[in-house]
Structures are given as C-alpha cells and as structure tokens.
Image: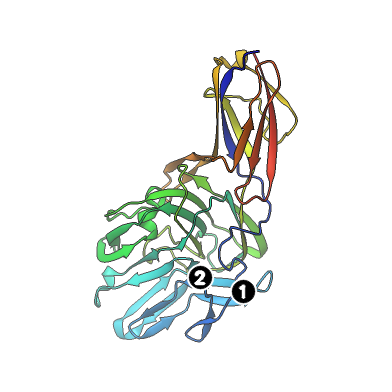
C-alpha cells in the first residue's frame, strides 16, 4: 500500500498549567533578602524602582510576610525634594532588569525613566503564574502590570520620552521600550532594534485584598530561541506611562510564588493549510479527519507544530499580532500513518519535560 503524505500543522494550547521544578526565574519565591537600600531589605536577584538622586533615597520595594515565607511589596510613592521644589509620584515596581532614572542637570522637564536589561535566558514557557494582592486608594483608576518578555540581540538607543512629552538624551542598552517595540515602543526612536521572541502582559484595574493567582499567557512572535528575558511586576501605570503621569500614591502590589508553566497540548491542527474544526485538543483518543470535507490534496505529508498563537492589546488600544513559533524535534515527534489505515501518532512534550501528550489522528479520504 502506498503511504501518502499530508501537511499537518499543530498549534499549542497554553492551558496546561502544572507547577515546574526547572527552568524557572531566579528566586521565584522571593526568599533571598540580603541587600539593603536605605536600611530596607532588598532582594538579591531582583531590583526595585528605588530612587537615589540629589542626595536623597526613596524606597519603592520592601520585604513583607508572604503567601509562603517572604514576599515582595512594591508601591507608588510621592517623591519630594524641597530644595529643588520637586514633587511627583514615582512608579513602584520590581524587575529582573535594572530600573533607571535620569534628570539632565536641574531641568525637571527632562526627567525620564525605564528598565534596562534582564537575565540570560534560553527557555520558552507558555504561561506565567503569579500570586498577588493589590491594595491602595485608587486601584479602580490605575492599572497594575505583570509582564514577561524575551528577545534575541542587543538593543541600543540614545533618546527617551520625558515627563513633558519631549525626548531626553541618555544612552541605554536593552531598554524595555526598545525591545517591546510593538506594545510599548520608544517614541523617540530605536537606534539598534532587536528580535523580540515572546511577551506575556497582564494589566487590570482591580483590588485584591486576599492572595489571588493570576495566570498570564505568554505569546510568541516567532520560532526563535531567546538569549535574554525580563520580568516586571508593577503596582501602577508603568510601563504604560513613561514618566510620572497617572500614578497614585499608595497603590501597592504584593507578589509571591512566581511559576513558569510549559505546555504539552495541541490547540489547533491544520492539514495542508486547512484547519480541522472538529479536532479536540483535550482528547488523547483516536480522532478521525476526512480529507474530502477539508478539500485537501494528499500528495505528501509534512507535520509542523506551533505555539503562542494570539493577540495582545497595547496601551493605545491597537492590536499587536503574534504569529506563534515552530516546535523543534525535542518537543514533538511523529510516527507516520497511512491514508485509510493506521493513524498518525503525534507525541508532544513540554519543553521542561514536566508533561507529555499523545494524539492519534486517523486520516480518511
């Protein structure tokens, strides 16, 4: 019997949510607090948006009792330097990268800020699970943010948006707004862009007085394997706002027990570019597809898997589309089948090895 070949495309579901023991962010339970800033304990592997300017220190990240052990607490704060007649509210957030602030001389209108860098990273998780509490006087009018992004290369720029809408000159490497060009791009221009691989961004205006688990889907723009990633947990309107607008003193975010989740389920299956609407991604029982109903030719079979299909909405309400990434042979293997005969057997493994799924597809004319 001649074995005919079919083009089957597989797209992953983000929804398999199981805790992992590997390929996690550093100190993801926030227990390592040996650093100090203004006599306040600080995380060793994470950085707060603390400010040290003109001889004054302002702390935005604190150690608190957590859901388990300790947790991180970040809060928006009013900053005042009377001798400069300076008063503003700063964003309370934490990051694997380094928060930065810049003021050109004593020109208050030149004030700008952001987040630079991240950590070396080669993994491709599907979901970020975060336990949070969100409190404050204005949580119904200010977003909090849970953000993951990864990239390939080194971004460079020399100008960034300041508090009055202009551009201030200051050179930065791997600045957040230079990497996330589609969703929070540097409005002053990017000198050396990079290839962003993935992004998961959750933001909401809500109060959570009790510990609440938030699961953030991570969406992929391409099939690249990243070289770096960064994570930002923000109590207020950052990174949505590049300077001091829209921030409210006292809005705070507790963060604990961050887990990256790696999926092994298929979300969508197409044959020769035609989506099979009857496919059940949750079943490992044998499923039957009829080529005649799809209008598919059967000259040859090619199987490719993809993950990270979806859309994100940027801060201006525009849609930034993410096309997903192709799976490699470490994640998916295929045992060929026959037309009107034995089924194709597709085995999908989570990238970290935490789970696996097997799908059987019987192909009929």
Q: Give the quadrant of the N terminus.
A: top right
Q: Give the quadrant of the C terminus.
A: top right
What residue do we see at 60% from left, 29% from top?
269
Cα separation, mark 2 vs mark 1, equals 11 Å
Position above or below: 295 against 161: above
Provide residue 174's location: percent of width, then percent of height: 37, 60
What residue do we see at 31% from left, 81% from top?
85
What residue do we see at 62% from left, 68% from top?
29
Residue at the front extreme of this rendering: 1
Residue 329 visible in the current orientation: yes
The label on residue 31 is 1
Provide residue 112's location: percent of width, then percent of height: 32, 67
First in sequence, mark 2 or 1: give its number. 1
User: Where does label 2 land, which residue?
Assistant: 46
Question: Which quadrant of the view contains residue 286?
Answer: top right
What residue do we see at 71% from left, 25% from top?
287
Provide residue 352's location: percent of width, then percent of height: 62, 51
Position above or below: 236 against 65: above
Residue 165 visible in the current orientation: no
Is the Cβ of the residue at disc 2 closer than 8 Å to that at disc 1? no
SS for tag 1?
loop
Query: Pointer 2: residues within 10 angstroms few (<14), some, or many (20+)?
Result: many
Provide residue 323's location: percent of width, then percent of height: 47, 38
């Amino acid at each position: 019997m001649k074995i005919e070949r079919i083009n089957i495309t597989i797209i992953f579901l983000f929804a398999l949510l199981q805790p992992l023991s590997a390929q996690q962010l550093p100190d993801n339970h926030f227990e390592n607090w040996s650093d100090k800033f203004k006599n306040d304990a600080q995380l060793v592997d994470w950085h707060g948006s603390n400010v040290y300017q003109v001889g004054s220190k302002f702390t935005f990240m604190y150690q608190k009792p957590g859901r388990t052990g300790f947790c991180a607490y970040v809060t928006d704060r009013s900053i005042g330097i009377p001798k400069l007649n300076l008063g503003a509210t700063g964003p309370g957030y934490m990051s694997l990268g380094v928060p930065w602030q810049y003021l050109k001389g004593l020109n208050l209108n030149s004030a700008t800020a952001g987040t630079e860098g991240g950590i070396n990273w080669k993994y491709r998780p599907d979901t970020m699970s975060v336990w949070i509490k969100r409190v404050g006087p204005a949580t119904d009018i200010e977003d909090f943010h849970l953000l993951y992004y990864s990239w390939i290369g080194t971004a460079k720029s020399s100008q960034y948006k300041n508090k009055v809408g202009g551009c201030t000159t200051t050179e930065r490497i791997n600045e957040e707004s230079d990497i996330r060009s589609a969703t929070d791009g540097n409005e002053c221009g990017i000198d050396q862009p990079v290839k962003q691989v993935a992004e998961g961004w959750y933001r909401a205006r809500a109060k959570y007085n009790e510990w609440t688990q938030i699961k953030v889907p991570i969406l992929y723009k391409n099939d690249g394997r990243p070289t770096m990633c960064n994570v930002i947990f923000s109590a207020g309107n950052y990174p949505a706002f590049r300077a001091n607008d829209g921030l409210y003193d006292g809005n705070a975010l507790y963060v604990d027990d961050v887990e990256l989740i790696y999926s092994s389920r298929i979300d969508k299956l197409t044959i020769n570019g035609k989506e099979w609407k009857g496919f059940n991604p949750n079943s490992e029982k044998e499923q039957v597809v009829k080529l005649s109903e799809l209008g598919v030719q059967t000259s040859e079979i090619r199987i490719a898997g993809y993950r990270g299909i979806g859309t994100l909405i940027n801060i201006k309400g525009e849609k930034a589309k993410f096309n997903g990434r192709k799976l490699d042979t470490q994640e998916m293997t295929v045992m060929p089948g026959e037309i009107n005969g034995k089924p194709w057997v597709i085995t999908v493994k989570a990238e970290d090895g935490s789970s696996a799924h097997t799908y059987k597809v019987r192909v009929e004319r």
